[in-house]
Image: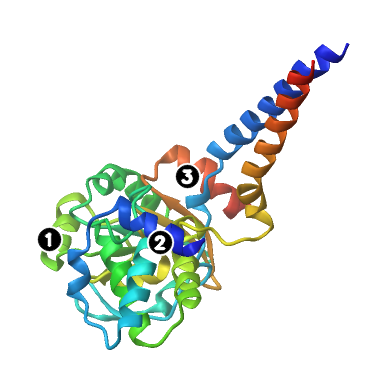
Amino acid sequence: MKKIYLIALPLAFVGLISAFFIWNLNYETRDTPIVSDIPDFKLTDLNGRKIDQSVFEADEYKLINVWATWCINCKLEHGFLMSLKNENFNIIGLNYKDNLEKANKWLVQFGNPYKKNIFDQKGELGFELGVAGAPETYLVNKQNKILYKHVGIINEDVWIQKFIPFINE
Amino acid sequence: MNKLLFLLYFVSSFSFAEINLYSFKSESQKELFEELTYEIGCPLCAGSNVSGSSAPIALDIKEFIYKEIVNGKTKSEIKDQVAGKFGDEVLFAPPRNLSTLLLYFFPLVLVFFSLFFLIKVRNK
């Protein structure tokens, strides 16, 4: 009787640890928005016009999409961003550590999914937002609150599973 | 304990050269910079601290740490600021709170359990 207890207890213990590790593997820490408010900023857009945080105040929901011409994955998600634009969803581009000329050329060549583009050459606003690289996409509401942060490519699956629940709430 | 950890970082990493890029008013500021860049991880490159990484974001964080030290910020203030942007996971020593309780006490629990069963089995 005691022998069973000596085997069962360590087994249960190992099982518990395994469950904990598996649960943690699926826990997406990097996607939880750590920065919750859009900080005040003064930068220019890709045409050299002044732009600040008021650019986010217009619509109920909008996206900030961090992109750059050097970012290969940004090209991969570009098609999906265009389809969001065609559904009249507003996307503010954060052109991150890029070259002004190349960025404008990219938008002419592949199409422009963005309502406005913030030119963040040094990555200052990016740093304030906790941007580690490109692409990253943030869902922002009318009060300039960041509801959700997605690291990596955005596509239809990610959109439906991760973003839509916030918008339908 | 922190000093021991700090020494371990020295053993495991040999990228000192770049520290010379930054100039400090005092030796204590320089030491603080070295400690912070060893204790703050690069959010893009898992397992590497910002001192040992040349990823653009790691350079930005180093620059930020430098500026804040020169502005007179304390070690914990700077750590909080960086974690406030990139998350607790960039801190190599996670803050001790309820959500990280398991992280700190689990090894102890494991040792106790192992000892307990070892003694039980050996007494048989």
Q: Nearer the viewer, mark 2 or mark 1?
A: 2
Q: Position of residue B4 (x, y in %)?
A: 45, 59
Q: Position of residue A130 (x, y in %)?
A: 41, 64
Tell me whether the residue at label 1 lies in contact with that at label 3, contact meaning CB atoms closer than 8 angstroms: no
Callout 1: 10 Å neighbours few (<14), some, many (20+)?
A: few
The lab-note entry on whether marks 1 and 3 share a chain reads yes
Residue type, label 2: Phe
3D distance between C-alphas at marks 1 and 3: 28 Å
- Which residue is at the front of the view, A111 or B2? B2
User: In the rendered image, which quarter is residue A114 located in?
Assistant: bottom left
Going by the image, does A93 lie left or right of B119? left
Going by the image, does A5 lie left or right of A66? right
3D distance between C-alphas at marks 2 and 1: 44 Å
Label 3 belongs to which residue?
A159
Residue type, label 3: Trp
Q: Residue at x 66, y 48 (%)?
A: B105
The lab-note entry on whether marks 2 and 1 share a chain reads no
- Quarter placement of the C terminus of chain A: bottom right
Going by the image, does A118 lie left or right of A7? left
Judge whether residue A91 can be spotted in this image. no
Label 2 belongs to which residue?
B6
Q: Secondary structure at mark 1?
A: helix
Residue type, label 1: Lys
Q: Secondary structure at mark 3?
A: helix
Q: Residue at x 19, y 66 (%)?
A: B18
Label 1 belongs to which residue?
A102
